[in-house]
Amino acid sequence: MNLLYVFLLINAWTFTWSNPCIHHPHSCRYSRLHGIFNHTQQKKSYDIDTDKSNSTEQQNDPGSIVHVMATSKVGVNVDEFSEDPTTLSGIIDILKAENKQFWIDRASQQILLTMYRFNFRPSFMPNKYQLPLTQPNHWKFEFHGKPTRDRSIDGHDLVYINYTWSTYLLSDFESPGISEPMLKNIGGKWIEQIILPCDPYHLLQRTGYACMDEGDFPIPSVHPERTEWFYDDTCDIEEPYVASPNQGCRQCHCSQTVNISCVDALKENIGSVNVSFIFTRLPWNQTQANRIRKLSDPQSTTHPEDADQNLLTSGLAAKLIEYKYFSSNSCEIHEPCIGGTGWRRLLLFDSSDENIGGTSLTIGQIYTLTDNATQEPAEVTNHGLYQYDTCHHHYHFKYYGTFTYDNEQFQNSKRGFCIMSTGRQANAEWSPLWSAFYNCTYQGNSPGWTDTYQAGIPCQWIDITDYNTTNSSTTAFLKANMNPDNMLCEGQLVLDAGGNFIWEQTNFTAIDGQTVYKPECVTGTNPSTLGNNIDEVQITLPTDGHGYVTEPCFPYGQHIGSEKNCGFMMKSPMEKCQPGEITKLSCLLETNLNCSAVLTPQVVRICESSQVLNTGLACDYNTALNNMVVNSSSTSVITFMCPSFRDSQELGGLYSIYVASIMDQLDDQQTTVVCEQMQ
């Protein structure tokens, strides 16, 4: 099919609504924050002090190269230590002496926070398409000067450094002009502005949901270790979300009501930087293209005429183990994707599939939105392939895949809810910069793009509660089998004379009793496009009471202060208190060395404990009963509310204590914390 025809077809799917802000909330928010892009951005492009030659298209070029660059500041917010000058001075000295890799890691995290904007750009800019940045192995950083410490960024105490970031986008000839009309010609330029946190870590801990865009996600999906999937600087104060059976989350904030905009939250709690990303289309250069392509994953496709979803083990390896509480009316019981109510121990992981074929994996129209944002079923759902879930308020694709741990003893069937192009893995001529599959209404995946379900999305896990790790850890394989029933067309769709799907009957039955149909498909061969859908990685489950917060911090040295969710040690798994009453602990630093040894500050975190599981619950910062930095100057008093009654088995009155060094660079492995309950 001609690419221009597809482009026009996609534009035909853009409807005119009586209230565009209901159906396109991202673009309304973007216009309020950054201005009307059709006018102001064009003027900014002409103001760049570079070559303004108006080159014409080179129609014979086999591809396109776009240079992207941005200048920013990235730093470490040390406001938390303002009342402890000794500790503060030591931290600042360490940060100023850090090597280049430390700042590359921190700047990379800041750049990752642009992912939501650039990968879902059509939602922010109608009639424009994605400008996906490359994978981090394509990135280049140049740092300017030495780290500086001052309060020039929104009045916050920051140790920061200036840097320039750059990369090259390699794609087909037409893609740049489809994604952004200003990039249609050689020499074309485009600037896109994004407001980012100067300190990119601990975003959820510091600003809550203010910068988290939950639109189209099941509630709740936001995870403190996956904020790059939700960061949206245009999020503003909104009316409280009201759930309805036929309408999912269509605004930024649905899990919580937020009374501050993202930009204001950054200014008040972290420090913000306004970053301009400059896109410039370069003349075609085959030598440069070859250099760029060498870093692509993959460099070429063995199935240029087929769709071919390839399971990426990197997602499975990105695991998080945590404890969550579920009541009897939880959607996860309805799914079901947990083994029971109460506290459950979960193995979370990312699930990511890249289309390494040369054509799109096309699923089709799942639903349409009415003027009141109600989801009306369309062709695919009318054939039973997708089924509406009244608990999560969106359509489910129940044939997405299966996940098993330890020889299928613990398993979960993953229901896809929105199969779409969430990121561009490849960086080569065969992979377009733009994708038609950028929201949940029309689903599929473009060549070289990935469809990722990140850890934190409900049911993106295996329930490991019943696995016995009381006395020792255990290691087994986490195995994934994607598209096990061949319900997605990994090959070529068979269409009728009018270009429509031909539906064939399956042996499956939908929840409403109707027969499930799937589009007729010719599966790719030599090799089979179904042959790369199964893979596995080794995963170790730690002993009870441990989770991702007790894992070593990564990258090393990046997580600093009481807001960190890594590097903790379980000090005491089960302590008693009076349910529902204020409890106070007196905490003091001690050391295993002689009395003259220097004591390093420690973070003390108080978590709930489970009577049923007989262990502490390794909580994160946001779910902790309290967090505090204990320093060497005096005894610290930590106050918290003793856990109350939850159910007939979890009666409350139990808590646990976890401790960690305030930063990796100050972990002497000798300092410890002793806490006693005050009467």
Image (spheres, grey):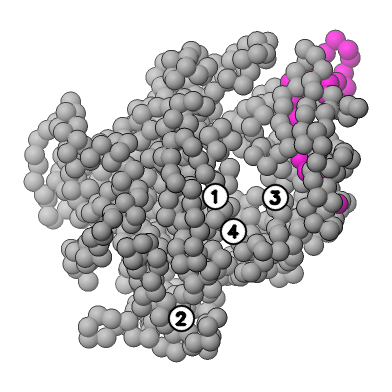
Tell me if residue 589 is in the magenta stretch. Answer: yes
Left or right of 466, for residue 457: left
Q: Which amino acid does label 1 sit on?
A: Ser
**Would you name the residue on which mark 3 appears?**
322
**Would you name the residue on which mark 1 appears?**
255
Other-residue count near label 4 (Cα within 10 Å), few / some / many at <14 / 14–19 / ≥20? many
Cα separation, mark 1 vs mark 4, equals 13 Å
- Disc marking residue 458: 4
Sequence-wise, which precedes: disc 2 or disc 3?
3
Cα separation, mark 3 vs mark 1, equals 19 Å
Callouts 4 and 3 close, C-beta under 8 Å: no
Sequence-wise, which precedes: disc 1 or disc 4?
1
Callouts 2 and 3 close, C-beta under 8 Å: no
Left or right of 419, for residue 664: right
**Would you name the residue on which mark 2 appears?**
384
460 vs 635: above or below: below
What element does badge 3 sit on? strand
Other-residue count near label 1 (Cα within 10 Å), few / some / many at <14 / 14–19 / ≥20? some
Cα separation, mark 2 vs mark 1, equals 29 Å
Residue range highlighted in magenta: 587-611
Q: What residue type is labelled 3?
A: Glu
Nearest the viewer among 232 and 497 is 232
Nearest the viewer among 84 and 291 is 84
Indicate the position of residue 391 as horizontal and vertical percent values.
Answer: 56, 66
Sequence-wise, which precedes: disc 3 or disc 1?
1
